[in-house]
Amino acid sequence: MKTAFRLAILVVGISIAGATFNFFGQEPSQTRTLYVYSGTLRSIDLQARTIIVDGSAVPWKFVVPTDAEIIVKGEPAGPKGKLSDLMVGDGVQVKYTVDDGVNVAHQISPLDVKHP
């Protein structure tokens, strides 16, 4: 009888905890892996906010959200750059995550500028 009572209390406790997370809209945090890809910038689509970087046998496409950090040559500590500041043909380093199978750029910088 004590075992059944303890089990019932445990189930109720788990249910309350789950309801609390759902009520506040919180989910357990999921850590995303940050990757780095380097290569030559081959194309920029300002409307779609995408870039294509060629650093291997197959060029990679990245989506660039509006809050991505874009660092332009000569401005490592300056104001945040814009997607239109990038130049096709430049060497770039892209720090990105993979979200639902899409490469999402979080930082784009020239290859000759080092950033932590």
Image (tube, rainbow, N blue to C red):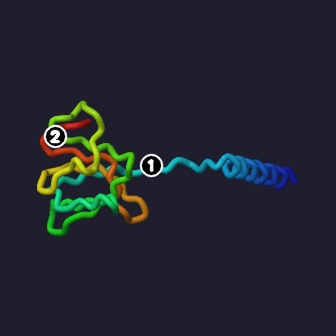
List the single residue furthest toward the bottom: 58
The residue carrying pointer 2 sits among few (fewer than 14), some (14 to 19) or many (20 or more) residues within 10 Å by Cα, namely: some
Say the numbered circle drawn on residue 107: none
Say the numbered circle drawn on residue 31: 1
| Kind of residue at badge 2 | Lys
* Real-space Cα separation, disc 1 to disc 2, in angstroms: 31 Å
At 26% from the left and 36% from the top, the residue drawn is: 116
Name the one closer to the observer, 44 or 30. 44
Q: Secondary structure at mark 1?
A: loop
Residue 35 location (% of width, % of height): 30, 52
Which image quadrant is residue 97 in? bottom left
In the image, residue 56 above or below residue 11: below
Name the one closer to the observer, 85 or 7. 85
Say the numbered circle drawn on residue 73: 2
Q: Secondary structure at mark 2?
A: loop
Q: Point out the frontmost of discs 1 and 2.
A: 2
**Quadrant for the N terminus in the image:** bottom right
At 13% from the left and 52% from the top, the residue drawn is: 90
| Kind of residue at badge 1 | Thr
Residue 46 location (% of width, % of height): 29, 58
Name the one closer to the observer, 81 or 53. 81
Which image quadrant is residue 52 in? bottom left
